[in-house]
Amino acid sequence: MAARIIVLPGDGVGPEVIAQALGVLELACEQGAVELDVREMLIGGRAVDETGSPLPGETLEACKAADAVLFGACGGPRWDHLRGAQRCEQGLLRLRRGMDVFANVRPVRVHPRLSDLSPLRANVVRDTDLIIVRELTGGAYFGEPRDRHGSGSTETARDTTVYTAAEVERVARVAFGLAGRRRRHLISVDKANVLITSQLWRDTVNAVAHDFPEVQLEHRLVDSFAMELVRRPAEIDVVVTENLFGDILSDEAGVLAGSLGLLPSASLGADRAGLYEPIHGSAPDIVGRGIANPYGAILSAALLLRHSLQRDDLARAVEASVDACVDGGIVGPDLGGAHGTVAIGEAVRRQVAQRLATVGVPS
């Protein structure tokens, strides 16, 4: 039976990079004897323009029934005036919760050829290969009550942070599982010296640790860890943290690689279905110029192959192809090169075709 893939190009450069990622995905699956059923749908600003909602009900239901979702970006200046549930970002938040993808997995690897392009010294970022696992459907972004009332100096606003032990446990298990397959070191980041939710977080992670005795667990406070992340990134293996902290830390980690355009992400739930997206935004300043970096989207497609389609062989072929292209200097303006979005996608597809033709893949 064909794997059902929903493609959400979205806004800004989303359609540009997703076109290249989808081309790579379809080629890898064709050569790997994986049948795909691909359907493109609306999200974000385009969805608001056409349906009045940043996440139409038809899109949400299709994504919930899919084997995987490949997403580009949403939002831009054209829709910045929208408020509340109409904001483009709310469509993505509702999609994550609707799919119940609670663990956002963000790999950050510094390619040896690009270590000089990081804002940090090359000797600091060299050999960095880490994963941040961010809890995605709880915490302050979804807590109730949340409100704002009054005016002037007496105006007040309130957000609420709520976590259950079950929410913490399930994302911790994802992180421990990843650490167990890597260097067996997990750092849990919280603010347990101040926040009650962080105290629950730490206690729950400690309880889960008993089921993973092969993994060394350490706890860090978010403020000191933010400094550690840019001082000694190569010493970090896997990190697990709550939604708000994870949002901030994963973007901080993103600069280590030299460009946000290089980095993929996977949002995973209890089953194989997942939501895959590059971590960069809609980049409205470069829309239509053909220079958006598609590597993050292409590597997100590789994560889709690995986690949702269970084809690690195809995922590794895509990742090795990206490495080969970067080694060969096939990079865009964000990395000091002159290659455009389409040219990069074509180069990766050539590499994928060569690799899979050479090594062969099981049918």
Image (tube, rainbow, N blue to C red):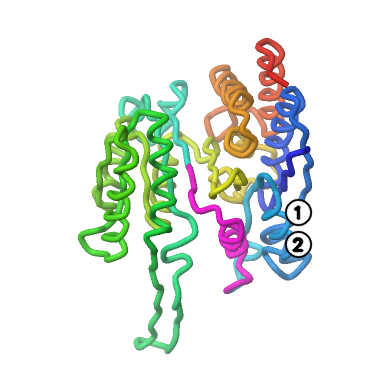
Image location (x, y in percent) of residue 101:
55, 53
Residue drawn at the location 29% of the way across and 52% of the way down: 222
Image location (x, y in percent) of residue 289:
69, 41
Circle 2 crowding by C-alpha within 10 Å: few under 14, some 14–19, many from 20: few
Q: Is residue 274 above or below residue 161?
A: above
Q: Is residue 213 above or below residue 275?
A: above
First reached walking from the N terminus: tag 1 or tag 2: 1
Disc number for residue 41: 1
Asked whether residue 103 is drawn in magenta, I would say yes
Q: Mark 1 near mark 2, Cβ–Cβ under 8 Å?
A: yes
The amino acid beneath tag 2 is Glu
Give me the C-alpha separation between circle 1 and circle 2. Answer: 9 Å
Q: Is residue 297 visible?
A: no
Q: Secondary structure at mark 2?
A: helix
Front disc: 1 or 2: 2
Disc number for residue 148: none
The residue where tag 2 is placed is 58
Image location (x, y in percent) of residue 271:
58, 46
Q: Is residue 341 above or below residue 209?
A: above
Of the pair 337 and 343, the residue shown nearer to us: 343
Is 347 displayed left or right of 251 in the figure? right
Residue drawn at the location 48% of the way across and 55% of the way down: 136
Looking at the image, how many numbered discs can be counted on the residues?
Answer: 2
Image location (x, y in percent) of residue 268:
54, 47
The amino acid beneath tag 1 is Met
